[in-house]
Image (tube, rainbow, N blue to C red):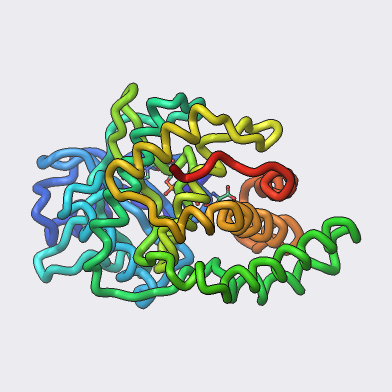
Amino acid sequence: MAVFTPVSLDDVAQWITQFPLGKALELKGISSGIENSNFFLTTERGEYVLTIFENLSFEQLPFYLNLMRHLADRGVLAPAPVANDKGELIVALHGKPASIVSKLEGRSQMDPQPVHCAAVGAMLAKMHLAGQDYALQQPNLRGLAWWHATTPEVLPFIPDEQAHLLRAEVHFQDAFAACDIYKQLQTGPVHADLFRNNVMFDGERLTGFFDFYFAGCDTWLFDVAVTVNDWCIDLDTGVLDTARVRALLDAYHAVRPFTAAEHTAWQPMLRAGALRFWLSRLYDFYRPREAEMLTPHDPGHFERILRERIATPAPGLF
Ligand SMILES: Nc1ncnc2c1ncn2[C@@H]1O[C@H](COP(=O)(O)OP(=O)(O)OP(=O)(O)O)[C@@H](O)[C@H]1O
Ligand SMILES: N[C@@H](CCO)C(=O)O
């Protein structure tokens, strides 16, 4: 269940007249997703997704919606937000912020092969390059500062062995973020949550990235690490599959060549990508929000990935 704010076709009929989309013909609630109310919206101009934001505010949303517009305008496959007659991408519906974006074709590929990983790697590099001249700034809100704020919140709940690993890894990442190599890494807008369920494929053809609501400015390499940690692993063990890693990295490198500094930073960055999701899953597990409707994701999955990245060097960037 993921429609928290019910909306009828009648509600939308008047509201949609401010958009250049013709009449609303059909509205269907989307059941997956736990953050927002999402609907497939068919209008005289085509198929769209209407989102009512349940947690993000009018002040927070422009960074994400304008980024999607910016990327879509530069040929990155991402949902393109539709502006109303005043040029606004975020418009109130039932008192909450809402937006209409283009609908991506296809479905998520939950059993990716090297061909899918290559498509993701190439589009990710294209996205990083296209984001270089994006004007708005926002840090990655799930970055180092958030790790520091959140670690003490979960430490009281977890066994000693996990607490030791968590403290040691945050300490390791502090040192990594302070080193000269880290400061040489290229930065810009990153998706920061590019998991299998946030990309659409039509067969082997990638049709788009979506769910940009963890995006922020961070190192491009962090985005690559998060993506590899989900797309290129055996889900039971967290062990990297070399064929998928190579396919993703080689395709990325062909569009935006990795630098020597990135090569050096790769192993610690894979650990950073694992720590970020271990910590957010621990937080959601032990400190569930009131509105949480679904079983929280398993933190153990990312603890395994983190331990595996510490123990076993990953294939190099190039
Ligand atoms: N632009 C789009 N085109 C096609 N389908 C979309 C689009 N945006 C969202 N969807 C569909 O809606 C579902 C829910 O969207 P999304 O994952 O963004 O939900 P959410 O509640 O915002 O976030 P979360 O994934 O964190 O629960 C997706 O799984 C996908 O099927
Ligand atoms: N991708 C995240 C969920 C939030 O988008 C996770 O798997 O923990």
Task: Give percent across and percent down for residue 58.
Answer: 35, 74
Tell me which residue sits at (30%, 43%) in the image.
Answer: 123
Tell me which residue sits at (42%, 32%) in the image.
Answer: 247
Q: Residue furthest right?
A: 160
Along the horizontal axis of the image, is 179 left or right of 216? right
168 or 29: nearer the viewer: 168
Along the horizontal axis of the image, is 70 left or right of 85? right
Along the horizontal axis of the image, is 272 left or right of 108? right
114 or 101: nearer the viewer: 114
Question: In the rendered image of this protein, does residue 90 appear above or below residue 252?
Answer: below
- Quarter-of-image position of residue 91: bottom left
Evaluate whether residue 27 shows in this view.
no
Q: Residue furthest top?
A: 203
Task: Give percent across and percent down for residue 294.
Answer: 63, 47
Q: Residue furthest front?
A: 260
Question: In the rendered image of this protein, does residue 58 appear above or below residue 280?
Answer: below
For the C terminus, the image quarter is top left
Task: Give percent across and percent down for residue 8.
Answer: 32, 48
Question: In the rendered image of this protein, does residue 153 appear above or below residue 306?
Answer: below
127 or 38: nearer the viewer: 127
Task: Give percent across and percent down for residue 98.
Answer: 32, 61
Tell me which residue sits at (15%, 39%) in the image.
Answer: 46
Tell me which residue sits at (32%, 69%) in the image.
Answer: 63
Along the horizontal axis of the image, is 33 left or right of 29? right
